[in-house]
Amino acid sequence: MSWLLDERTQLDDLGDGRYRREIDDGEYWGTGSPFGGYLMALAFSAMRAEVTDTDRLPRVYSHQFLRRVPVGPLDIVVSTERIGALVHSVTARLVVGDDTVGVAGGIFTGDREGPSYLDDPMPDVAPPTEPEGTDVPGWACNVHGRFIPHRRFGQDGAVVPNEDGGWLRMVEPGPWDHRLALMCSDVWPPPVIRHPDRMCATPSLHHVVHFGPDVGGSADQALLVRHRATHGHGGMTDEDITLWADDGRFLLKARQLRTVIDLSRIDTSSFT
């Protein structure tokens, strides 16, 4: 984990499953609120601290974004819902003052016998050492300054299939784990914003992640992310997200639900 991300995801342990982080509008700020992937990394850190059996690995993480998170103290309150022979289930509430601003859930499991396969291998794309494709629309928030992107999907501007993504490197790299994977599943601008008929803002409502069996690696690795928008209706749009390490390991599969807001309704003065 890069020293900066490691430092910014450290939590104060207040006891009884409650953790605190002082939120600022610095490196991991998004559009009027902390970057959603950063909030997920914080909640995950609190969950991981509560699941003390390190043999139980993260399998699922989900997050509902209920409202914007302001600058100031953010409390994360973790509850253990059940500890079984194989599964440890936890939930977390993200709280500012008396308001719940987010709800997260996690499933950690041990290993058992079963099939082992990978039916979604990493696509054959140009390596991250070939740095073309750095012009990424929407790459404008504070958090984007922490990443170096190299586009590999949607390069020809095609609308259908509506996809986007590419290689991601941290500006200040270091050994990484599930926290960085969560951030990389959310940092690339959603592909729907590139469609000429769908220019909009798309705040996240819900993000669910299923992790692969081996999430983590060394500082010199790049991660490859692919976003695909599948459908939208009723003022909502969704996308499928897949993340791989540059050695071909499958890291996660995610699905995200977003609300669609016409750009004319956005108060850009709230952006940093």
Image (spheres, grey):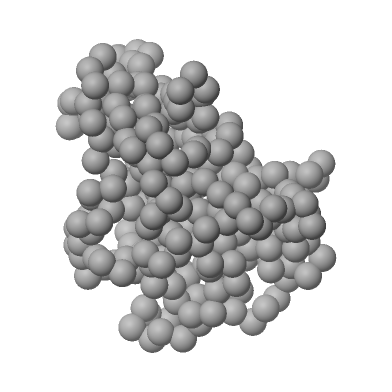
Give the vertical position of 79 relative to 40 (above or below).
Answer: above
Give x and y (percent) for residue 100. 51, 24
Residue 77 seen in this snapshot: yes
Give x and y (percent) for residue 151. 50, 75
Along the horizontal axis of the image, is 246 left or right of 12? right
Residue at x 33% of width, y 16% of height: 80
Along the horizontal axis of the image, is 139 left or right of 259? left
Give the vertical position of 77 relative to 266 (above or below).
Answer: above
Residue at x 47% of width, y 47% of height: 34
- Camera-side residue: 271 or 180? 271
Residue 118 seen in this snapshot: no
- Camera-side residue: 271 or 15? 271
Total marks shown come to 0
Give x and y (percent) for residue 31. 56, 53
User: In which quadrant is the N terminus drawn?
Assistant: bottom left
Residue at x 33% of width, y 52% of height: 180
Q: Hey, which quadrant is residue 23 in on the image? A: top left
- Camera-side residue: 183 or 8? 8
Residue at x 54% of width, y 79% of height: 135
Give x and y (percent) for residue 224. 41, 66
Q: Hey, which quadrant is residue 192 in on the image? A: bottom right
